[in-house]
Image (cartoon, helix red, strand yellow):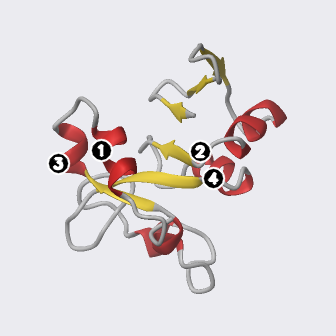
Amino acid sequence: VFTDALSSVFAVDDAGESCAIKFSGFPTPVLLKLFSEAQFCLVPPGDVPYRMHLTAAVLGHCIPIVVAFTGMSTSWWRHNGPSVEQSLPFSSLIPWRELAVEVPVHVVEAGNDWIERVVESLSEADV
């Protein structure tokens, strides 16, 4: 399961067929089901620091893959954006950065098969 910038969720079934489901607002039961069947879920940066995609990934029990922008701190939103700790709720209680796979923005900007390369590079201990 992965998402694009248009808030579509793409899922690939066992037969290799893909489908797209549009959503907006709070995660739907269909979206949560798709996320619960995935091991990793892409949480793309958006127009605000916090994304409902992250909520859907956490509620769906899949590991979020986020784009890590660097600056004075690491932001999942944009270059020189607020830090992860500043932009996510309960950051003093929830180790957000330990719950996600952070992919440096330069890896994403390089294009092509970056998702596959990142996922394949993770060990069982990482997951």
CA gap between label 3 and label 2 equals 21 Å
User: Eyeballing the image, is 52 above or below 87?
Assistant: above
Q: Nearer the viewer, mark 3 or mark 1?
A: 1
3 and 1 marks in contact (CB < 8 Å):
no
| Rendered position, 46 above or below 12 | below
Q: Nearer the viewer, mark 2 or mark 1?
A: 1
**Above or below: residue 117 compared with residue 69:** above
Q: CA distance from mark 2 to mark 4?
A: 11 Å
Instruction: Say what secondary structure mark 1 lies in.
Output: helix
- Please provide percent x and percent y for residue 118: 33, 49
As helix, strand or loop, the secondary structure at mark 2 comes to helix
**Residue 18 place in picture, x, y as percent:** 58, 16
Return the residue at label 1: 117
Residue 113: x percent and y percent?
A: 28, 33
Q: As shown in the figure, which amino acid type bears the numbered disc 2?
A: His
Q: State which quadrant residue 28 falls in.
A: top right
The residue indicated by pointer 4 is 62
Residue 23 in sight here: yes
Q: N-terminal of the two: label 3 or label 1? A: 3
Point out which mark residue 53 bears: 2
Viewer-closest of 121 and 8: 121
Residue 45: percent from the left, percent from the top? Answer: 41, 45
Name the residue nearer the viewer: 122 or 104: 122
Mark 2 or mark 4, earlier in chain: 2
- Circle 3 sits in a helix, a strand or a loop, which is it? helix
How many residues crowd around disc 3 within 10 Å: few (fewer than 14), some, or many (20 or more)?
few
Q: Is residue 35 left or right of residue 104?
A: right
Q: Is residue 27 visible?
A: no
Number of residues whose C-alpha sits closer than 10 Å to that of mark 1, classed few (under 14), some (14–19) or many (20 or more): few
- What residue sits right under mark 3 in the picture? 106
Front residue of 66 and 45: 66
> Given contact means CB atoms under 8 Å apart, are the residues at marks 3 and 2 in contact?
no
